[in-house]
Image: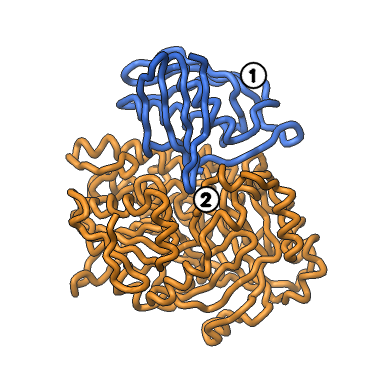
Amino acid sequence: MAAWFELLEHTSDVGILARGANREEALIAASHALASILVDPAAFRPVEERYFRAPGSDEAAQIVNWLNEILFFFDTEGIVFVEFAIDSWTSHEITGRAKGERFDAERHELRTGVKAATYHQFESHAIPGGWELRIFVDV
Amino acid sequence: MHLEKIDDYRWLIPKSYKAGMRTDAMIYANERLLEAIRQDQSLEQAANVAMLPGIVGRALAMPDIHQGYGFPIGGVAAVDEHDGVVSPGGVGFDINCGVRLLSSTLTLKEVRPKLRELVHQLFRDIPSGTGQSSRVTLSDADLNRVLETGPRWAIEHGMGSEADLDHTEERGCIPGADPYAVSERAKQRGRAQLGTLGSGNHFLEVQYVEEIFDQKTAAQHNLDKDRIVVLIHTGSRGLGHQVCTDYVSQLDQAMRKYDLHVPDRQLACAPIHSPEGQRYLQAMAAAANFAWTNRQCIADAARGAFQRIFGEGVNLPAIYDVAHNIAKREVHMVDGKQKRVVVHRKGATRAFPNQAVFIPGSMGTASYFLTGQEGAMRETFGSACHGAGRVMSRSAAKKGVTAKEIQKELESRGIIVESLTREGLTEEKPEAYKDIESVVDVVHNAGLAARVARLRPIGVIKG
C-alpha cells in the first residue's frame, strides 16, 4: 500500500487520516500531513537533520509525542520537516530522524498554526494491506 | 439526544442520560443555536464533563459551545477543591487565551482617514504568527519572572503602567505560579513568542462603539458612540500549549495511580490535592501569567503604533483583560452553602457581577462588551460565553473562496484586514461562526451577562 493521507473535517480543528504499508509508514504519512497543515511543504528542502525521541506508556502516547516533536522544532527553530525516518519503535518509545529546512518568509508559505496533537478520537489499527492512523490536532 | 426544555434559553441533559454522569448538564441556547450545536459531538462532550469526579452543581455549556477535545469549547465545570479533580483538558491547550479591550482618546471620524496606515503600522509592530520573531527578548531570569509575576515584569520594563494591572483579571498574576513546574521544552517554545498574536482565531481589531445599551456602565469606561477601541484576542502561545501537552501526558499516567476513569483520554485528570494536580495548577498559573504578559506587550505595541500615526498625545487606557481558558480557585454558593471549588472555564469567560466581559466576533461581525450579572453567580459559577463559536470546519470554510475575495469584500464594508497567511482569512471568515447576536441574546436574556455596547471592527490584523 502506498503511503497516503487526508485531512478530516472537525468543527474547530483538523483531523489526520494516514495510511501506509505498515505502522511506521502510516506514522510517516501522518507526519507529512501535519507539515502540510503548518505550511505548503513543496518549497522546503531536506537540508537540516534533527533527532526525534517520542517516549510513551503506550502506542497512542508515543504517536502523539512523535507528532508533537514536529511542532516543538517548528516553534523553537522554525524548521519544517519534509523527510522522516523511524529508527526504532519499542514498547517504550519511538526514535527517529527528520530532515527539513528553516522557514523563510521570502520563499515559503505559512498556513495554519497547530497547538498540539491530541488523544481525541485517536485510532491506530491494521487494515487490509497496511495500517491506518487517525489523529486530531488542535489548531 | 433528548433534551429537557427548561425555558427558551435553558436545556437540560439529565444525569440519567448515560451511566457515569454524576450530575445534570445544562445547555444555554435558543432553538436556533441548538440546531447548530446538535451538528457535532459537543452535547455528548458536555455529558462526559458531568462524569468528572468531584463535580459540583451542574456541568454547563454556553451558547457558543462547539466540539473540542474532551471538554466542549464553551464548557464550564466546578469541582470540589477538597475531593475533586483538575483536568488540563478542561482548560485547553491555549491556557489563558483571553481578551483585552483598550479604550482610546480617538473617534471614528479621526481614525477613518488614516485607517489603512494605522492597520499597516499595527501589522508591522505586532508579530502575528509563526515565522516572525518577537520584539521582546527574554533571559532565563526574565522568563521565570514573567511566569511568576505576569505583566508586572512588562511594566517594570517600560511596557505599560500600574493602571493596566488594575484593569486585568487577578491583576494579571495567579498566586502560586511556579516557573519550575513549567518544563524546559515549554520555556523554549514560549521564549521567542512573548508579544506575538499567534494564528487561528487570534487577532487584534480596531473597532468603534456602534451602539450603547447601558449608558451608565459605558460612561464609567469613558465609552461613547463612535469611540475607537482596540480588542486583543490571544493567549499563552507555544508555552501554554506545551504545558497542557506535558500535563495531559503526566495526568494520563497518574489516573492509574488514583484509579480514576474518564470517558475520553483528553479529559485526563488528577485529584486537586495530589502532587500531580498541584503541579499542574502551579504550571497552569505560570502559563496564565505569561498570557497576561503577552497581551500587555501587545497592548504596549498597539499604543506605540497609534502614537506613530496620530501623535504622542493619543492614549489607549485599558478597560479590562479577562481569560476564557482557565481553571480558578473560587468560592461559590452550592446548595445554599459556601464552597471552595476549582472552576474550569474552557471557552467561557468569568462573569462576576459588574465585571467586564468581552465577546469577540470574527472580522466582519460585531464584538460585544457585556457585564456579568447575579444570575451567573447563581447558575454558572460566575461564567458566560466567550465568542460566537465555530459552526463550520476549516476545510469547509476555505471552499469556494479566496483570501483576496474576503479581503475585498471586507474592504467594501469599510474593514481593512492584514493577515500573514491566506488561511488566516479563509478559515476565519465570518460565515464560519455562529451568529454572535443570538449568542449574546441568550446570555443576556438568561441573566448571565448584560449588554453594555456593540463594537464594530474597521481594522483587523491576523496571523
Residue B265 vertical position relative to residue B324 in the rendered view, above or below: above
At 45% from the left edge and 60% from the top edge, which residue is drawn?
B64
Q: Chain of mark 1?
A: A
At 37% from the left edge and 37% from the top edge, which residue is drawn?
A121
Where does label 2 land, which residue? B392
Residue A83 vertical position relative to residue B239 in the rendered view, above or below: above
Q: Position of residue A79 (x, y in %)?
A: 61, 29
Q: Chain of mark 2?
A: B
Which amino acid does the dot numbered 1 rest on? Pro
Question: Which chain is represented by blue in the image?
Answer: A
The image quadrant that residue B76 belongs to is bottom left
Q: Position of residue B43 (x, y in %)?
A: 34, 54
* Element marked by disc 2: loop
- Residue A2 or residue A38, whichever sits in front: A2
The disc label shown at residue A46, or none: 1
Image colour assigned to chain B: orange
